[in-house]
Image (spheres, helix red, strand yellow):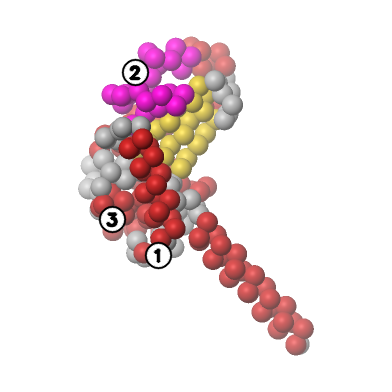
Amino acid sequence: MGRFIYRAAAFISCWLILSVCTAADRLAVPIITAGNPDAPTRIDFYLSPTCPMCAATFRNTVLPLLIQATRGRQLFVFIGILPRSPGDADFARVLTCVPQDKLLPFMTRWYFYRRTGDARLGKLFQMGKQYGIAGQSVAECTSEQNDAMLLGFNQFVFAKERISETPAVFINKKHVPEIFYLWQLEDLLPELSDKDMKDGS
């Protein structure tokens, strides 16, 4: 009996240690990727979790590109969720609570909700419960270390690259301003056309 209690205590202790490490080490910036990292074309999207244009860009441009990236080896898509204001930052902090494997379906639902719904933090928590958000407050979804990483990443993208608004789009690490729709990307990158993607699928 004593041996069983010892083993149970050891198991619980290990579980707690792993849980603490997982909470401390989770992504400071919610990130979604798809496709082949070695593809000749990489498109990076930096989106605010609240801006209406980011929601439209996600629905009309990002989702189709994610599908294309999973079908062939010619495209890699990166999506970083970044704040543009103190209030916006709370939304990004909450999204760090979402398990990585559920982040895409959750962001898809959130950005479709943003077509007509207001950006309310309470709504984000409510919708996130079925996607693995365990916390009930912003403080439970972040840490000082995560905040430092989040703000540092935000500063790198927006300050170093001299970007003042979202959505921000990069093609092969080069900022391409005023790109919001899929047809604009297809004009710049003929390899993203339907014909070429069908041939490669």
The span shown in magenta is 168-193
The spot of residue 166 in percent (x, y) is: 29, 35
- Is residue 58 visible to the viewer in this orientation of the structure? no
Callout 2 touching callout 3 (CB < 8 Å): no
- Magenta span includes 189: yes
Q: Quadrant of the N terminus?
A: bottom right
Q: SS of the residue at dot 2?
A: helix
Q: Which residue position is annotated with label 3? A: 121
**Residue at the spot x=31%, y=24% of the render?**
177
Image quadrant holding the C terminus, namely: top right
Q: Could you say which disc has been placed on residue 140 in the image?
A: 1
Question: In the image, what residue type sits under mark 3?
Answer: Leu
Q: How far across and how far down the image is residue 23, in percent? A: 50, 61
Amino acid of disc 2: Gln
Q: Which residue is mark 2?
A: 184
C-alpha span from label 2 to label 3: 32 Å
Q: Label 1, secondary structure: give it.
A: helix
The x and y percentages for residue 100 are: 50, 48
Q: Quadrant of residue 14?
A: bottom right
> Which of the marked residues, 3 or 1, is nearer the chain's N terminus?
3
Amino acid type, label 1: Glu
Q: Secondary structure at mark 3?
A: helix
Q: CA distance from mark 1 to mark 2?
A: 40 Å
From this viewpoint, which residue is outermost toward the bottom?
2
Residue 17 shows up from this direction = yes
- Check disc 3: other Cα within 10 Å, few if <14, some if 14-19, many if 20+: some
Crowd class of label 2 (few under 14; some 14 to 19; many from 20; radius 10 Å): few
